[in-house]
Amino acid sequence: MVQINLRDFYPFYNSDTFVEVPDEVAAALTEAERLERNYIRRVVYNKAFYSLDTGDGIEHDALFRAPSPGEAYERKIMIEQLYTALNALPNKQRQRLYAHFILGIPQTEIAKADRVSVVAVNISLARGLKKLERLLEKIF
């Protein structure tokens, strides 16, 4: 058993905290720390201070996998059911829910466009979400 200071390995520790860990764990932590220092040194030496995601989508492609045909079909069906439930709502609620949650328009802008208060839009969105939830529960 080896005694290590957690403050050396975890930056969120503000004070010294000593714990005993098996030799393998101490070796793994020391190796990870060494690899991290080497990586930082290589970045500085090569002046590689940039992201892989420079607009061509390399980072996105590396992080996200394409859905399988079954997953794509399930997603399509779920979106169709969502739009069916949205169409069952009253016109104003449907427009406000679509604008706020799908288009990402803030409630203040929706209120200005409809010439109502932000509170009215907020209440309309809350009631619309409850109705939408009930409609989707019936579908599923």
Image: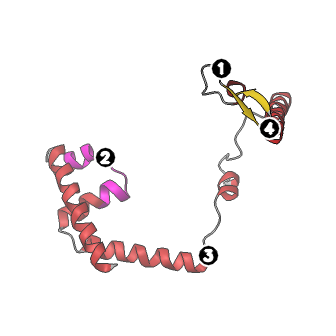
Q: Which residue is mark 1?
A: 16
Q: Is residue 2 left or right of residue 139?
A: right
Residue pointed to by mark 3:
68
Q: CA distance from mark 1 to mark 2?
A: 46 Å
Mark 1 to mark 3 CA distance (whole Å)? 49 Å
SS under mark 3: loop
Tag in front: 2 or 3 = 3
* Residue ID for mark 4: 32
Mark 4 vs 3: CB contact within 8 A: no
The amino acid on which the numbered mark 1 sits, given as a three-letter code, is: Asp
The span picked out in magenta is 98-112
Q: Which residue is situated farthest in the front direction here? A: 1
**First of labels 2, 4 by sequence position:** 4
Q: CA distance from mark 2 to mark 3?
A: 34 Å
Q: Position of residue 99 (x, y in %)?
A: 31, 57
Q: Quadrant of residue 9?
A: top right
Q: Amino acid at mark 2?
A: Pro
The mark nearer the N terminus, 1 or 3, is 1
Disc 3 marks which amino acid? Ser
Q: Identity of the amino acid at label 4?
A: Ala
Position above or below: 49 against 127: above
Circle 1 residues within 10 Å: few <14, some 14–19, many ≥20: few
